[in-house]
Amino acid sequence: MMSNPSVANTVPRFRRVAIDWQPEPVSARLRFGLVALATDHVSESELHRMMPPEEVDLFATRTRHDGQCDIGSLRAMADGLAASCDLLLPGTPLDAIAYGCTSGTVAIGFDRVAATIRSQRPGVAVTTPISGAEAALRALGVQRIAMLTPYVDEVNALVADYLEGRGLEVTTLASFGLDTDIQMSTVPTEAIERAVLDMDSTGAEGVFICCTALRSVSTIAPLEQRLGLPVISSNQAMLWEMLRASGYSRPIQGYGRLMADLMVDGTG
């Protein structure tokens, strides 16, 4: 059946909305950026779980990573970091940007990570899991730590040497001995909790669950209750550092002493 052109031409294809409206005011919520690894299954969901949803927005981009957790692959991520940051809400101010890899920050170097991010977003607060962990441990008055990681020995040594070079003491280090992000993301939370409880924490003043690929934030409060020690994780410490850098100072319950006692000056 053929259409009637004279009828079709009387129906406008486009019509301008006729209602009056005003642009929404700029949100008062904090805006955080996350540079996550291309192979990361965990950090975004863990950060969203802990964030106060009415007060903080999280926007993520990805950076290329081959999924291997060895020193060469970790250092190779530095080459794509600037391009990844360039895709993170261009033209929109952000309160902080986190690079979401603990061992990657250590392998590349925090100063290089921060300089690369600021080359794309000048003046932004830059945080990482390892800088957050160090600041959190100091805020909690912890110098001697028992540490759980998913890493192979060469990466364990890199991270332990970094922390000890910053004046902390690793009293014991237990590891799942895994070498890919995918394997790390499949470790059950129950296994993480059992591994921490199985560590020799004698002499330790706190526990560090190291790696953003471990699903561990739900274990923090129960472990603190069982051990009587403060427990921090990479994702928790990364968020805490972003909040603190942005001036947020209200307690967040359910994720350990660090978040519950959160204060803008880092003391609780």
Image (cartoon, helix red, strand yellow):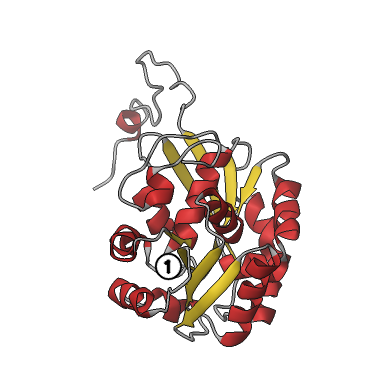
Q: Amino acid at mark 1?
A: His
Element carrying mark 1: loop
Q: Nearer the viewer, residue 168 or 245?
A: 168
Q: Nearer the viewer, residue 253 or 52?
A: 253
Answer whether residue 37 is visible to the viewer in this image.
no
Assess disc 1: are there few (<14), some (14-19) or many (≥20) residues with their C-alpha within 10 Å of its C-alpha: some
Percent coordinates x, y for residue 105 in the rendering: 65, 64
Answer whether residue 115 is visible to the viewer in this image.
yes
Percent coordinates x, y for residue 104 in the rendering: 63, 69
Quickly name the residue at label 1. Answer: 41
Q: Number of marks in the image?
A: 1
Q: Nearer the viewer, residue 46 or 191?
A: 191
Q: Residue at x 52, y 58 (%)?
A: 142
Percent coordinates x, y for residue 145 in the rendering: 51, 67
Residue 160 drawn above or below residue 144: below
Q: Quadrant of residue 21?
A: top left
257 displayed left or right of 89: left
Percent coordinates x, y for residue 148 in the rendering: 46, 74
Q: Residue at x 70, y 56 (%)?
A: 82
* Outermost residue, front side: 203
Q: Quadrant of residue 197?
A: bottom left
57 displayed left or right of 143: left
Residue 207 drawn above or below residue 2: below
Q: Residue at x 45, y 32 (%)?
A: 29
131 displayed left or right of 75: left
* Outermost residue, top side: 20
